[in-house]
Image: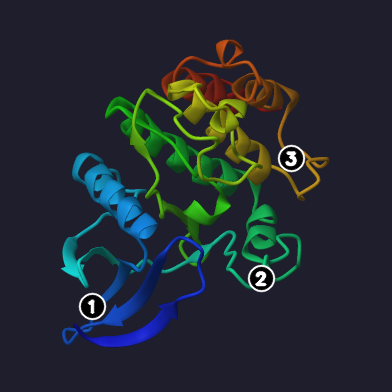
Amino acid sequence: MGHIFRVFDAQDSGCISYGVRTGDNSRWFVKSATTPAGARSLDRAREFHTRIRHTAVIPVRHSFTAANRPALVYPWVDGQVLYHPTVHTRPDRTAPTAPMAHFRRLPLPLVHQALERILQAHLVIAAAGFVGVDLYDGCFLYDFARDRMHLCDLDEYRPGPFTLGTERLPGSTRYMAPEETTAGAEINERTTVYALGRAIRLLMDSGDAESAWRGTSDQLRVVEQATAADPTLRYSTVHELCTRWRAATRHMG
């Protein structure tokens, strides 16, 4: 296909990915499955991307089969994922050179702008009937040169609502709603609301201890309702969360 300029081969997703430069100097991100679980994940991703179009969501441009397993081709997007764990390391988000620490030092208007992109994309995702699964800071690719947020690696998103038939869904416990680790629980739009609330909480804090909130008390109250342990106490839709968050942000100070 072209020249491989970067390899991502230390993830635990059952996939291996490549940065590929083609003859016309175009750059692509090629993700291929190496395990049955990885193949199922990429099949979900292919379905998701046939129905979701938003400028913040990095799209699938092509797909093909390699060794009887799917491979997806995305445009290469410059930037850094805010957290990049591998099977060998778990980076320190608070290290001064870490992408997350860099993001947390940005002026608040830029952080609000990035969060707005995440929320806008999830309005489209929810309207298409998909529930967020395995959303975490590794899905946030931020272009520091252009101050632009992108979403990647949304492979586990799936149509909802659905009943959890296993002990737990994949994901980071820092972002997961209680029902995502409760067999027989319903996973629905309120679950997405919880994950988005956690994203706001963690991206608006100066550190990982969640003791240095950079926003206002009104904004924090929105986050607290979005992340209530009882799903019935959360905002019922992503749209409602967005409306409340925007109102609190508009009236900052």
> Mark 1 highlights which residue?
26
Task: Tell me the kind of residue under disc 3.
Answer: Arg
Q: Which mark is residue 214?
A: 3
Q: Residues within 10 Å of mark 1 (few under 14, many from 20)?
A: few
Q: At x 52% / y 41%, what residue is drawn?
A: 115
Identify the residue at image location x=54%, y=37%: 168
Could you tell me which secondary element the residue under label 3 belongs to?
Answer: loop
Across and down, in percent, residue 194 comes to: 56, 28
Tell me if I can see residue 58 in this picture: no
* Mark in front: 2 vs 1: 2
- Residue at 41 percent of width and 69 percent of height: 78
Image location of residue 53, percent across then percent down = 25, 43
**Residue type pointed to by label 2:** Thr
Mark with earlier residue (2, 1): 1
In the displayed structure, would residue 236 be above or below residue 200?
above
| Location of mark 2 (residue) | 89
The CA distance from mark 2 to mark 3 is: 29 Å
Q: Quadrant of the C terminus?
A: top right
